[in-house]
Amino acid sequence: MGVLKKSSNFPFTNPALNYTELEASITSNKTLNISKQINKYIKDKKADGDITHLSVYYRNLNNGGWFGLNEQEYFSPASLMKLPILISYVKKSESEKGLLERKIVYKKNPNLSDYKQNIPPEDQLIEGKEYSYRDILEYLIIYSDNNASAILEANLPMADLQKTFTDIGLLFPVINS
């Protein structure tokens, strides 16, 4: 269990969570039972060979109680990395009027030719077709399309993406090839 501290940085969070120390009511038997059930599930799945590792972070939004199982484990953020790209374009569109309607012709990224997406997009960009940035952002988020991600990243100044990471409190990833 952790300690929650009052923060004025997050005015839209549940006001019931604005306290400095955990209270006895937070560590409820119900929360602890859920934790035990999930822990058993993880052990069973590992024993069956269905998973190698799994992490869980649970937080009760009504009273702030939480538990974590392997919550400090490092995982690849995978498609979650697409969200800062979306945020960067939306933010950039605030100062560059018409950015999202600007058109670009899609060309496959040769660096992705050997990369197989685990869950291929239901709908894919068509090479040689013209798309607006808004359309490509939709492919990015709706279909989790890695090709959309690649074309958007290639046309976004790295400084903009780094600023988005910093603004949302994340470290900018360094990718080791």
Image (tube, helix red, strand yellow):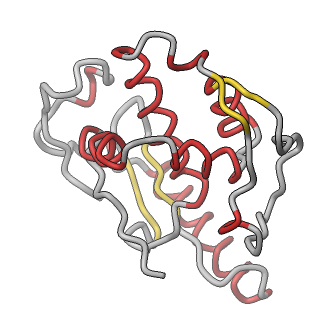
Which residue is found at the position 64% from the left and 74% from the top? Answer: 42
Rendered position, 166 above or below 93: below
Name the residue: 31% across, 24% down: 13
Indicate the quadrant containing the N terminus: top left, top right, bottom left or bottom right. bottom left
Question: Does any portion of residue 11 appear in the rendered image?
Answer: yes
Residue 171 placement: quadrant: bottom left
Q: Position of residue 60 (x, y in %)?
A: 44, 39
| Residue found 82% across the figure and 40% down from its top | 128
Tell me the quarter of the picture where residue 160 sits: top left
Q: Is residue 153 left or right of residue 164?
A: right
Q: Measuring from the top left, give residue 108's x and y in whole percent.
A: 75, 54
Q: Residue at x 70, y 46 (%)?
A: 144
x then y, percent, for residue 79: 61, 53
Left or right: 90 as drawn, with respect to 122: left
Which is nearer the eye, 74 or 15?
74
Q: Which residue is nearer to you in this view: 10 or 143?
A: 143
Q: Position of residue 113 (x, y in %)?
A: 76, 69
In terms of image quadrants, where is residue 15?
Answer: top left
